[in-house]
Image (cartoon, rainbow, N blue to C red):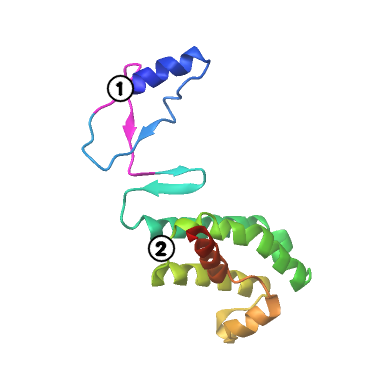
Amino acid sequence: MINTLNEESRKVGLEINLTKTNIMTNHTERPIYLENSSLTYVNAYIYLGKQISFNQQNNELEVERRVNVTWKKFWSLKEILKSDMTIRMKAKVMNTCLLPSLTYACQTWKFTRTVKNKITSCQRSMERSILKIIKIQKIRHTDVRQKTKVIDALSHSQKLKRSEDK
């Protein structure tokens, strides 16, 4: 079947990239060849920014990946977020750049306690960071949120999921 796809693709000027082509299955792995090269089996891969997997823990792994991606984005914006700019400006950057990164594809998530904690913890840590607050200072997250006025990531992602379910 893959060889037929390859042949038909070539007729219209398309070519399958053997180095980027992987196979994922929830069944028995059998060797599959394309142009005398064996294709690689993988347990998970990233497709359009979302991790795809048959793993039962994929949900939590995907949320952990989103948290890591969001932190990378946070540090790429450190000149703004760690500067002396107004809290309002920093909150706007968080809402427009970091919130979409954290909640990307959240419509497919199952909101377990672990997932909720990861989302909340990530956002709260970022809020404390932009306000230059350390945990030892014992400032409540409600007080921090009152200062930043950022959109709550957990509520936002659950709202997106509910709107998708309709």
Tell me if 66 is positioned left or right of 99 in this view: left
Range drawn in magenta? 31-44
Q: Amino acid at mark 2?
A: Lys
- Picture coordinates of residue 22, whole percent (x, y): 37, 33
Label placed on residue 110: 2
Q: Amino acid at mark 1?
A: Tyr
- Which residue occupies 45% across, 23% down? 16
Labels 2 and 1: the sequence-earlier one: 1
Per the image, is 35 magenta?
yes
Who is closer to the viewer here, 59 or 74?
A: 59
- Picture coordinates of residue 154, whole percent (x, y): 53, 69
Residue 74 seen anywhere in this rendered image of the structure: no
- Which residue occupies 52% across, 72% down? 120
| Residue ID for mark 1 | 33
Residue 16 seen anywhere in this rendered image of the structure: yes
Farthest residue toward the left?
28
Q: What secondary structure is found at the residue carrying circle 1?
A: strand
Label placed on residue 7: none
Q: Residues within 10 Å of mark 2 (few under 14, many from 20)?
A: some
